[in-house]
Amino acid sequence: MQKQQYRGIGSAAVAALVLVSFAMRLSTVAAGQSQSKAQTPTAEKTQTKVVLLGTGTPRPYPDRSGPATAIVVGERAYLVDFGPCVVRRAAAAAEKGTPELESTNVKTAFLTHLHSDHTAGYPDLILTPWVMGRTELDVYGPDGLEEMTKHVLEAWRQDIEIRTKGLEQRRALVVRAHDVKPGVVYKDDRATVTAFRVPHGQWPEAFGYRFDTPGKSIVISGDTSPSEEIVAHCQPCDVLIHEVYSPESVLTMPDYKTYRAKYHTSTNELAEIANRAKPGILVVYHTSGRGPNGRIPDDQLLREIQKTYRGRVVIGHDLEVY
Ligand SMILES: [Zn+2]
Ligand SMILES: [Zn+2]
């Protein structure tokens, strides 16, 4: 078992960054299992909610924050992706009836891939809840997450030093980043989280995740072109949260049609995936769609999907709960 610990990013005892290798996955699972034996949660304590914190893309629509999804099980919160604006959207969700998303309660996060629209909120996720009183954060994701974490902490080194050594007297910041491989990457008495590979263009590693909680099974696609893994991991699932684009949408890049085909999933392709996966509900997010005449409306996306998919489907919006 390999374990690297960075204590003090440039300064002893200021910030602790513990980088835990893939091998540590098993110890995390084991820790979760022993916790499970210690307490048997009641049904109320394991009620599961999916809260959409960010349903957007890189395009900064004010009503669609960067990709971020919260799974709340009882009083515990798990986050998938941390696009821009993530902490303030979590605070808004807390005010709207999900107090478990108070920023200090967000202590466990999962990353689908390192694209900036999914990670631009990372310094926010690390620093803002810490300033508010949270001390520890565990983050799981593909190769490169540990390195990114180290760089974020280094970039904010002066802030961390002044807040911990100065009059603010903040407790040491602890972030444990885990580069993980597909499989069960996390387990406690509320949730089992399985990562699986999805194809996302030139990214060497991008994940989707499946959450199994006492009340629900949830699959999140992350960014992906049509993937058999999504179908395989939703057999069955209660909620499938999947990205989409409209074939009518356009992008300002030289060969956007080729790019799209390799990186993302069209409405037609998503309908085919959903017909095979048969989720209880399909929640569409990461909706990229700007047509020649401006933003492609939700009802058009819905119509395109429903041409061949007859199951329950919604176009998701920020702060909706499923
Ligand atoms: Zn994206
Ligand atoms: Zn992406």
Image: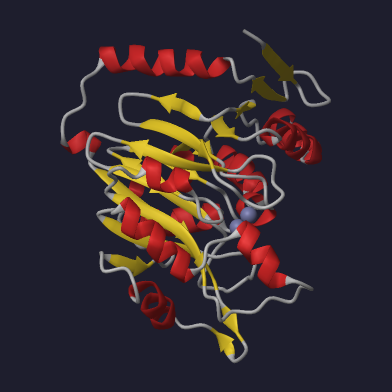
Left or right position of 170 against 182:
right
Q: Is residue 285 above or below residue 9?
A: below
Q: Is residue 38 above or below residue 289?
A: above
Dividing the picture into quadrants, the one containing residue 241 is bottom left
Asked whether residue 96 appears in the rendered view, the answer is no
Which quadrant holds the N terminus? top right
Q: In the displayed image of the protein, which residue is found farthest to the top?
A: 1
Q: Nearer the viewer, residue 163 or 208?
A: 208
Residue depicted at x 67% and y 71%: 257
Q: In the displayed image of the protein, which residue is found farthest to the left?
A: 43
Point out the quarter of the image occupied by ligand 2.
bottom right
Asked whether residue 39 appears in the rendered view, the answer is yes
Left or right position of 213 against 182:
left
Q: Is residue 296 above or below residue 293?
A: above
Q: Is residue 22 above or below residue 44?
A: above
Q: Nearer the viewer, residue 269 or 84?
A: 269
Residue depicted at x 35% and y 15%: 33
The x and y percentages for residue 113 are: 62, 45
Identify the coloring.
secondary structure
Residue depicted at x 75% and y 71%: 255
Dividing the picture into quadrants, the one containing residue 34 is top left
The x and y percentages for residue 300 are: 42, 82
Q: In the displayed image of the protein, which residue is found farthest to the right?
A: 10
Across the whole image, how many numbered discs are drawn on residues?
0
Q: Nearer the viewer, residue 188 or 219?
A: 219
The x and y percentages for residue 75 are: 31, 37
